[in-house]
Image (cartoon, rainbow, N blue to C red):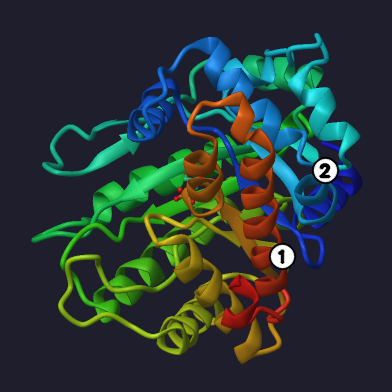
Amino acid sequence: MNKDQLAKVAQAMVARGKGILAADESSGTIKKRFDAIGVESTADTRRDYREFMFRTQEAMSQYISGVILYDETIRQNAKDGTSLVKLIEAAGSLPGIKVDAGVKPLPNFPGETITEGLDGLSERMAEYYKLGARFAKWRAVIDIADGIPTRGAILANAQALARYAAICQANDIVPIVEPEVLMDGGHTLERCYEVTEFVLKTLYDELYEARVFLEGTVLKPNMIVPGKKCATQATPEQVAAQTIRVFKQTVPVAVPGIAFLSGGQADVEATANLDAINKMAKLPWHVTFSYGRALQAAPQKAWSGKEANVVAAQKAFSHRAKMNGLASKGEWSKSLEG
Ligand code: 13P
C-alpha cells in the first residue's frame, strides 16, 4: 500500500471548491433515468450522454474533482475513439469506479439488505487500476421502517465496507465508503440522526478492526434529514445542525473529507443543505458533494437524447456543478440560481 499516494488522491477528491460526480448508475438505474426523458438506453446512448458531461470543460476542470464510473463506462470510448477515462483525466479530474455488485436481501433479516461483491474483488481492483481508476465506491443501504434497521444488518454491512476498503488500499485505490441511510420513509429527522449515528460508529469500529488507513479514505454519507413522507420537513439550518453534530460524534478527524450523496433530495435543496453545513461551522473535514441525481437531473432533462440540445445540457451541468462547488465553500446563495 502506497500511503502517500492514497492520502494525496483522497485530498484531491475533496479539494477546496470541488466535489465528485457520481455517474456510476448501473444499467438498470440509467434505464430508469432515460425512461423518464424518453431516451432508449443502449450502450451508444449511455456513451453519448456520459461523453457530453465529461467534455463539459467548465464543470469538469473547475468543480469536479473526480467521476465515479460504472464497469461499462470505464471501458468505453468516446465517438472519436478517445477513451472516456482519458477525457476525464484531460479535464484534470480523477476517474473512479463503482465496485459493489448491488444489494441482495439479507437472509434472516426481513426488509434488510447486504451489499455483495467481495469475491474476486482484489483481482478486479488490480484491473481497474490499470484502466485508470484511482478511487472506488461501495454503497451499503440501510432502510428505516418499523423494526428496522437491526444491529445485525448494520454490522454485516459495516464489515463488508471495511473488507472492501482494505482491498482497495492494498491495490492503491482510495475507497469511498458509503453507508447510505435512506430518506424514503416517513421517519423523523431525530430517527435519521439516531440511526446514522449508530451506523457511522459501527462503520468506524469496523474500519479500525480491518486496519484501514483513514487518511486514504473518503466518507460518502447521507445528511440528517426527515424521511420524504414525514409530515414535518426541515430547514437547511436544521439539517446542517444535526448533520454536523452526528459527524462530530462519530467521524475521526484523520478522515480528509466527507462527500455527501443526494439520496433523492431535489437539486437546489441538496445545494442549499450543503451550503448551510459549510456556512454553519469551521469543520475539520472538507465537506463537499458526491451527487448523482442532484447534479444530473437538470442536464438529463435539457439533453433529452438530442444532439442539438448538448450545448444547453452542458450549460445546465456546469451550472449545477458551480452551485455545488460554491456550496462546498459555504459561498452559495439562492439568488445565484438565476
Ligand atoms: P445520488 O446523489 O443520486 O443519491 O447518488 C449518489 C450515489 O452515488 C449513490 O450511491
Q: Residue at x 73, y 67 (%)?
A: 254
Q: Is mark 2 within 8 Å of ligand 1?
A: no
Quarter of the image where one finds residue 334:
bottom right
- Tag 2 residue: 57
Q: Name which residue type carries label 1.
A: Gly
In this rendering, the answer to whether 185 lies above or below 210 is below
Q: Residue at x 64, y 87 (%)?
A: 279
Q: In x, y percent, where is residue 205?
A: 51, 59
Which quarter of the rendering shows the C terminus?
bottom right
Q: In x, y percent, where is residue 111?
A: 14, 44
Tell me if I can see residue 135 in this picture. no
- Cβ–Cβ under 8 Å for marks 2 and 1: no
Quarter of the image where one finds residue 105:
top left
Sooner in the amino-acid sequence: mark 2 or mark 1: 2
- Taking depth in this image into account, of 211 and 128 the one nearest to the observer is 128
Q: In x, y percent, where is residue 118?
A: 49, 25
Q: In x, y percent, where is residue 308?
A: 62, 29
Q: Residue at x 69, y 39 (%)?
A: 311
Which quarter of the rendering shows the N terminus?
top right
- Taking depth in this image into account, of 331 and 104 the one nearest to the observer is 331
In this rendering, the answer to whether 287 lies above or below 264 is below
- Tag 1 residue: 325
Q: Is mark 1 within 8 Å of ligand 1?
A: no
- Taking depth in this image into account, of 41 and 160 the one nearest to the observer is 41
Q: Secondary structure at mark 1?
A: helix
- Distance of label 2 from label 1 (alpha carbons): 15 Å
The nearer-to-camera label among 2 and 1 is 2
Residue extending farthest to the front is 308
Label annotation for residue 3? none
Quarter of the image where one finds residue 322:
bottom right
Q: Residues within 10 Å of mark 2 (few under 14, many from 20)?
A: some
